[in-house]
Amino acid sequence: MVGRFAVANAEGSIPEDAIRIRIIANSDKKTDQSVKNKVRDEVATYIAAWGGMPDNHDEAYALIKSHLAGIQEIVDDKLVELGVSYKGIAELGEVPFPEKTFGGESYEAGTYEALRITLGKGDGANWWCVLFPPLCLTAATAKDDAGAASEVRTVSSAGGSSAASDDGDGEPKAKFFLWELLEKLFAFLGSLFG
């Protein structure tokens, strides 16, 4: 069963067939939240390099799935680069989301289709956004229910059958995923020619 987010924003509610992205930190320690944000930035750059997201759910899902091994490689490489002792896993499928409240809006708990990246124990605050259709919402963070993670039916990069931002300072901040990606892409291109 795929739940429905009852969220209002400038674009309206998140569509029933949305595909989310969720990155869960190892813990709420500042260092683990920093690792989560650095992994997020690497994954965002990788996703931006794909070009635009397709116009329909099935094509978007297939595109994300076709890049799942690449996402896993990005996660693995970044964790090694950062020198942390834990691993990460990238999964695509229906995953449980805890209830979230931010800015007076209630985000219903439920099972939603998502690209989920769990770092280490996955006991920390998470960052999330909507990949398809490509839009982001105001920040929403929550600790995961450890029991819910075992109920996940997913396709992982290892072949197994898994918006918003929290910058780790305790204060969620509104972010726009695609805008951030474009800014990073332009900064990168500028560094090549500058």
Image: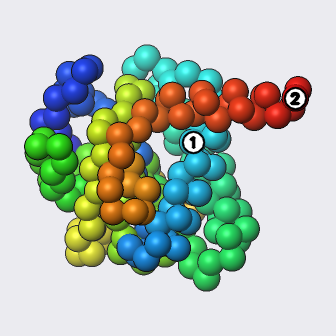
Q: Is 167 on the left-hand or right-hand side of 15?
A: right
Picture coordinates of residue 113, whole percent (x, y) = 32, 44
Q: Quadrant location of the C terminus?
A: top right
Residue 157 versus residue 5: which sits nearer the camera? Answer: 5
Mark 2 surroundings within 10 Å by alpha-carbon count, few (fewer than 14), some (14 through 19), many (20 or more): few
The dot on residue 194 is 2
Instruction: Tell me if residue 126 comes above or below residue 103 in the rendering.
Output: below
Q: Residue at x 15, y 55 (%)?
A: 99
**Disc 1 secondary structure class:** helix
**Between residues 87 and 157, which one lies in front from this camera angle?**
87
Horizontal side of 192 relative to 19 (left or right) equals right
Residue 44 is tagged as 1
Q: Quadrant of residue 135?
A: top left
Dot 2 amino acid type:
Gly
| Picture colour scheme | rainbow
Q: Residue at x 52, y 57 (%)?
A: 37
Quarter of image, res 148: bottom left
* Residue depicted at x 62% and y 78%: 84
Answer few, some or many: residues within 10 Å of disc 1's Cα (few below 14, many 20 plus, some between 14 and 19): some
Q: For the residues marked 1 and 2, what is the alpha-carbon distance in whole angstroms?
A: 23 Å
Is residue 128 in view? no
**Horizontal and vertical percent for residue 30?**
46, 72
Do labels 1 and 2 touch, CB within 8 Å? Answer: no
Q: Is residue 170 visible?
A: yes
The mark total stands at 2
SS at mark 2? loop
